[in-house]
Image (spheres, rainbow, N blue to C red):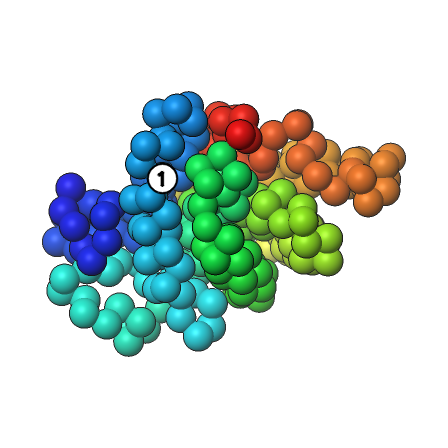
Amino acid sequence: MESVSVSLCWRSYWLESGVGPCGVAGILDVVMHAPAHIVKPHAADIEDTVAYVIGLQDSHGNWPSKAGPRRKNPLASENTLIQWCHGAPGILTLLSTSILSCSTLEFSSELENSLVSALVRGASLTHSRGLLRKGPGLCHGVGGTATVLFQAADALASQPEEQRACLRRALHLLQCYAELRGGRHFAKPDRPWSLYEGVAGAAAALTEALERVEGLLSQGAEGMGMPRGHPSGLLGSGDLDLPARA
């Protein structure tokens, strides 16, 4: 592990710090799912690093794939990738987990406000650019962009309008996929049936969408929340419940 202007950044084989799920964001997301008594002693370092990641958000609401000593101004680079493995969608996972951990880890109100603002901007961008043509999977497909919008909705429970917007956006992306699939709109991935590249990822996202819709139909506004009693998350990434709030 090497310091890159903040307490917790990990150097990748590119000799720069990976920002997304394969780098800082993914590692911190996993760390915050550890038991609270283990994580709390490191809360200040985590808060410092999360604030650093928020600061990398560009004017469009996206994030660079990498940042570090060799990228003195990462925001000057062209941040065109918007998928779970690169760009805003993967960072939304970290932001959502951080918001849900604010009470347990006693993050500052300033950070919490910054998290909400960054999440709202990133969610809007993810929706507008989230109908990806690489395939339907979780890693770089519509299954992933829809799922992180469900995660954002869970984290924005205190902001009902933004929560509803995230749910609508996730459902809209999946509706578009359902209507366009079968034609030539989407590329055939290398592993077309897999979870992170293929239709298994779309099936996971569509299953959650059905649960959300059923909740809305049966409970109204109260059914917007977490369908299984815990936050949404990509299969294999967000399977653990967050520690109980203090």
Left or right for 98, reference 164: left
Left or right for 221, reference 101: right
Residue at position x 61%, y 30% from top?
230
Residue at position x 29%, y 44% from top?
45
Vertically, is 229 above or below 132? above
Vertically, is 86 above or below 222? below
Q: Secondary structure at mark 1?
A: helix
Q: Amino acid at mark 1?
A: Ala
Given residues 133 and 219, the one toward you in this image is: 219
Left or right for 235, reference 212: left
Residue 182 place in picture, x, y as percent: 61, 50
Residue 130 place in picture, x, y as percent: 54, 59
Asked if residue 61 can be seen in this view, the reply is: yes
Residue at position x 26%, y 68% from top?
74
Given residues 104 and 231, the one toward you in this image is: 104
Q: Which image quadrant for residue 21?
A: top left
Given residues 108 and 16, the one toward you in this image is: 108
- The mark tally for this picture is 1
Residue at position x 68%, y 54% from top?
159
Residue 13 place in picture, x, y as percent: 14, 47
Q: Which image quadrant for residue 131?
A: bottom right
Vertically, is 169 above or below 144? below
Q: Residues within 10 Å of mark 1 (few under 14, many from 20)?
A: some
Asked if residue 188 can be seen in this view, the reply is: no
Residue with the mark numbered 1: 43
Residue 30 place in picture, x, y as percent: 38, 34
Instruction: Classify the position of the N terminus by image quarter.
Output: top left
